[in-house]
Image (spheres, rainbow, N blue to C red):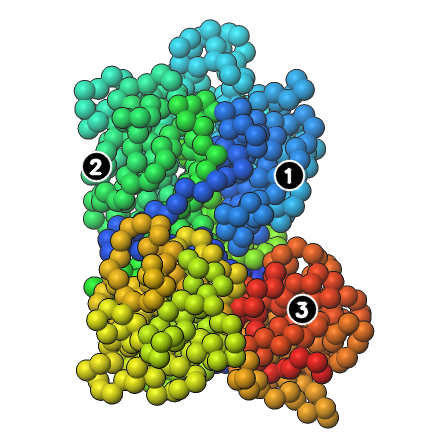
């Protein structure tokens, strides 16, 4: 547990609040307090479609798991996480993953998942081809990709992707040297240093002196960029560090060291480069060079095919490799070496070897300090029988390696891996040249995302960052962070945003911050003291709880001249609940903290106290729902033949009443139960493995009426509205409610088939029973109302009554405050919806027609993007934007406090149903 702190909360003026309000990012899901955000930077959340894995195996809490193979628009040979939370990748044209080209920059919005609509290809700039370039952030948040291959006879330029990921422009300055396969870093003073590289496609280990004589070794003299021009550091020219022997010039592994110099490893050499003045460099031996070996344990862990990561301040893990390039090499190494540069002179220590030798793997440092190694080959870049599919995890506390689950796709040379804000590792790319040419991606979910409850694996409750005093920090500066964590906060860390290519990610460094708990329960956090420890740039701020579970990362800027992160969206990971103990009365709005579970839903997995949160994804038990079959769209779970439940159309009013249920805390004290709204003494209950609507007469039969809500077993649900879920029997684990061939319902043991997955999945949509009474409209005298989201029971609000144009509209625990009150004023085509506290109108950003466009507040203009029609739906109404004909929606059906409002295609789901207003005012 981090220590208590008496440090006073830093003051944040109104101007600071206004400047930072639009720059907020994501959070996870855990139990939440009802109070308003404490600090100016209020965390805004959006959907995270790829953050929730399907069908979690019971091994996940120990090993993690992989999910899917998803299409990617191009071969992601280079990949970087932008300050906006979007991801840029490049390496091939969209139409051919085997073609080498860095003139197509794909921008992926993770909040859109792997749907093609989440990707945008940005056009290239003249005279720049970023294939096999190197990347670094600039002070304004833009990403510079310098060097690469020839384009129109030029190879000394650079492309600049802006921090929002909306455009690419050329850098005005040209480098002095050809820079193909270089490495670039941001120095402590903010300049960019580029080193190594060669004339494209020429030179190297096979003919060292000839390569120099022909002018191919152009990268032996480093250069620095000061924001205006490049300058050569002639004093740091080095054949030993960046020359042709053993391909030292090929993406040198380099980091800013705690002494302010640049430390690097180039094949069999290591060195310190001083970038001040004209530059200087000192080179010493590292290890023996690449050579033939009979075993992986005997092979040296050197060369371009090795991978390396700074897993802690001044501490580096170097592993694998033993090749000159992707076609000339030897048996891959399993050796792993620790390089300690905290004291100046490097200290080398051998740690345990990897379980499997690997060339062209990727190493990714995780928030907890563990290092995940993915991909690689047993022999240079050979696939088939030499492909290494299982990942491995290294623990710096023990030095031990643990073999993990296997990926589906070979990822060797030109593959990439990167830590995302939701704590997963995205892997992509590989090939160009083959043996594979991958236009796809996979996601690895580390063990810390899971827990084991009642013998079953589930997503772990996570700490959640709610608000911050600032997201732009100078060195040594303190800030306050509002955080909620069921298990308390034990550690606060920073992780550099990843920029990865050719098995090396130079910017991903992890550091533990000074932190303490203030008297008001917030966490005081101090930025690193020096730019030598945290070079200026962009980092994820992560809270880790006592159980080792990290919060999702919040992107922050570090350095006096580094711009604050731009306006962006970021993921809100879901939690699959496995509830236990009897529910109470005040359930968590988005997480089931121990002892407070009950009737208003939640997402927790806590098992202590007197209860846990009610439902798996926060569906309010008092909101009636109907269950549409995913395998038979248009049919619903309803009572037929007296008591037997079946999947059948709901043709008349009686059918619709029979298909209406309230989701309530499980009668057995576990999971959830389905209460019929027509006869409230009856519940869905299995008997003889068939499903009936029966009274529950005793505690002995209550487990038969209790079910655990799970993420849908079906990967794609065939229905059109509501969240898709599956229901596992509480007293028969691994038995799910399922539509049988004769359309009756029962609980059947899980079988790994697509038919089973589809038949055991259902869409929760607003009740078909239109006789249920909606909440009355407000009186005409005040004409204000709460907008309570039916799926979460939380109210739409402008947090803290922020009066800025562009302030987000998010769901918050209902308090009835003015910032949660909305006034409906009739206009042509519908209503304007004005916040009672701020006097500003509910607005869709930029009159956008895009699905997923943000809803926020703006000065009332009367424009069509501020006009909303009301349509009766379930127990409330849908709000339909006049300009786009899309519905107001809580993104991703999130149940977390702070989840943002967006517009989305109307589907009738509970997250598009708002209790309070009525249709036809």
Residue 757 makes an appearance in the image: yes
N-term-proximal mark, 1 vs 2: 1
Q: In which quarter of the image is residue 449?
A: bottom left
Q: 251 and 714: which one is in front?
A: 714
Q: 755 and 887: which one is in front?
A: 755
Residue on which the image places disc 3:
880
* Disc nearest the viewer among 1 and 2: 1
Q: Does residue 373 appear to the left or right of 482 in the view shown?
A: left
* Disc nearest the viewer among 1 and 3: 3
Rounded to the nearest whole Å, what is the CA distance between mark 1 and mark 2? 41 Å
Q: Are marks 2 and 3 in contact (CB under 8 Å)?
A: no
Numbered label attached to residue 863:
none
685 in relation to 99, above or below: below
The residue shown at (51%, 28%) is 97
Give the x, y percent position of residue 913.
Answer: 57, 73
Q: Split into 4 quadrants, where in the image is the N terminus?
A: bottom left
* Disc nearest the viewer among 2 and 3: 3
Q: 446 and 48: which one is in front?
A: 48
The residue shown at (56%, 48%) is 118
The residue shown at (67%, 25%) is 127
Give the x, y percent position of residue 219.
Answer: 52, 21
Residue on which the image places disc 1:
122
Residue on which the image places disc 2:
355
Give the x, y percent position of residue 41.
Answer: 57, 67
Q: Does residue 424 appear to the left or right of 234 in the view shown?
A: left
Q: 362 and 794: which one is in front?
A: 794
The residue shown at (29%, 64%) is 736
């Amino acid at each position: 547990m981090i220590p208590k702190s008496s440090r006073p909360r830093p003051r944040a003026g109104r101007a600071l609040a206004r400047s930072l309000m639009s720059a907020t990012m994501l959070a996870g899901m855990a139990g939440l307090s009802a109070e308003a955000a404490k600090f100016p930077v209020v965390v805004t959340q959006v959907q995270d479609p790829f953050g929730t894995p399907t069908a979690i195996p019971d091994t996940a809490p120990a090993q993690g798991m992989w999910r899917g193979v998803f299409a990617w628009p191009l071969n992601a040979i280079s990949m970087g996480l932008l300050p906006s939370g979007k991801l840029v990748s490049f390496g091939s044209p969209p139409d051919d993953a085997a073609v080498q080209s860095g003139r197509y920059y794909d921008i992926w919005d993770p909040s859109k998942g792997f749907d093609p609509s989440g990707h945008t290809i940005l056009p290239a700039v003249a005279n720049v081809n970023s294939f096999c370039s190197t990347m670094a952030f600039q002070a304004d948040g833009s990403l510079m990709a310098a060097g690469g291959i020839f384009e129109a006879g030029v190879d000394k330029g650079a492309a600049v992707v802006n921090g929002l990921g909306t455009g690419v422009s050329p850098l005005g300055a040209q480098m002095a040297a050809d820079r193909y396969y270089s490495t670039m870093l941001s120095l402590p003073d903010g300049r960019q240093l580029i080193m190594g590289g060669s004339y494209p496609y020429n030179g190297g280990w096979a003919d060292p002196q000839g390569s120099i004589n022909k002018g191919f070794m152009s990268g032996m003299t480093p250069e620095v960029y000061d924001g205006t021009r490049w300058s050569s550091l002639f004093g740091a020219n080095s054949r030993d560090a960046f020359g042709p022997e053993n391909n030292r010039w090929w993406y040198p592994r380099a980091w800013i060291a705690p002494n302010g110099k640049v430390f690097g490893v180039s094949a069999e050499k290591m060195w310190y480069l001083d970038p001040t003045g004209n530059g200087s460099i000192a080179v010493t031996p590292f290890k023996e060079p690449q050579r033939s070996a009979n075993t992986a344990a005997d092979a040296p862990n050197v060369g371009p095919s090795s991978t390396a990561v700074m897993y802690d301040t001044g501490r580096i893990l170097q592993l694998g490799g033993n090749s000159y390039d992707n076609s000339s090499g030897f048996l891959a190494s399993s050796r792993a070496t620790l390089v300690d540069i905290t004291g100046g002179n490097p200290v080398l220590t051998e740690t345990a070897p990897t379980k499997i030798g690997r060339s062209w793997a990727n190493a990714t440092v995780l928030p907890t300090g563990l290092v995940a190694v993915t991909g690689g080959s047993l022999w240079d870049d050979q696939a088939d029988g030499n492909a290494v599919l299982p990942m491995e995890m290294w623990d710096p506390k023990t030095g031990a390696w643990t073999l993990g689950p296997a990926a589906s796709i070979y990822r060797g040379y030109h593959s990439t891996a990167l830590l995302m804000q939701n704590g997963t590792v995205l892997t992509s790319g590989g090939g160009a040249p083959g043996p594979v040419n991958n236009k796809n991606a996979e996601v690895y979910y580390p063990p810390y995302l899971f827990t084991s409850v009642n013998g079953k694996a589930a997503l772990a409750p996570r700490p959640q960052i709610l608000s911050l005093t600032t997201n732009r920090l100078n060195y040594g500066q303190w800030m306050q962070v509002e955080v909620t964590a069921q298990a308390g906060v034990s550690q606060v860390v920073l992780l550099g945003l990843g920029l990865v290519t050719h098995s090396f990610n130079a910017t991903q460094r992890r550091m533990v911050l000074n932190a303490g708990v203030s008297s008001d329960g917030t966490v005081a956090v101090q930025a690193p003291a020096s730019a030598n420890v945290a070079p200026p740039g962009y980092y994820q701020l992560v809270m880790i709880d006592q159980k080792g579970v990290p919060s999702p990362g919040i992107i922050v800027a570090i350095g006096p001249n580094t711009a604050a992160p731009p306006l962006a969206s970021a993921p809100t990971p879901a939690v699959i609940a496995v509830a236990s103990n009897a529910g109470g009365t005040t359930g968590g709005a988005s997480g089931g903290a121990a002892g407070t579970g009950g009737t208003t839903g939640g997402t927790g997995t806590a098992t202590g106290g007197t209860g846990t949160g009610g439902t798996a994804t926060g569906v309010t038990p008092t909101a009636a729902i109907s269950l549409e079959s995913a395998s038979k769209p248009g049919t619903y779970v309803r009572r037929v033949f007296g008591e037997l439940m079946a999947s059948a159309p709901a043709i008349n009013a009686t059918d619709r009443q029979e298909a209406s249920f309230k989701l309530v805390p499980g009668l057995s004290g576990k999971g959830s139960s389905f209460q019929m709204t027509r006869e409230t003494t009856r519940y869905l209950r299995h008997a003889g493995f068939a499903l009936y609507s029966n009274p529950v007469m005793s505690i002995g039969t209550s487990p038969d009426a209790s079910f655990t809500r799970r993420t849908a077993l079906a990967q794609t649900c065939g229905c059109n509205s509501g969240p898709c879920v599956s229901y596992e029997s509480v007293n028969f684990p691994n038995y799910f409610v399922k539509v049988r061939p004769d359309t009756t319902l029962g609980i059947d043991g899980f079988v790994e088939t697509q038919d089973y997955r589809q038949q055991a999945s259902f869409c929760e949509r607003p009740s078909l029973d239109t006789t249920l009474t909606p909440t009355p409209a407000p009186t005409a005298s005040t004409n204000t109302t709460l907008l309570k989201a039916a799926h979460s029971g939380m109210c739409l609000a402008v947090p803290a009554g922020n009066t800025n144009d562009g302030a987000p509209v998010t769901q918050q625990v209902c308090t009835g405050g003015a910032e949660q009150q909305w006034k409906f004023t009739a206009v042509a085509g519908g209503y304007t919806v004005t916040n009672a506290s701020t006097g500003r109108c509910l607005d869709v950003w930029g009159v956008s027609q895009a699905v997923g466009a943000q809803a926020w507040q703006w000065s009332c203009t009367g424009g069509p993007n501020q006009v909303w029609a009301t349509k009766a739906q379930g127990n409330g109404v849908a709000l339909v934007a006049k300009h786009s004909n899309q519905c107001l929606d809580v993104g991703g059906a999130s149940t977390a406090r702070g989840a943002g409002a967006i517009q989305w295609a109307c589907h009738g789901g509970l997250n598009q149903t708002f209790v309070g207003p009525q249709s036809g005012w």
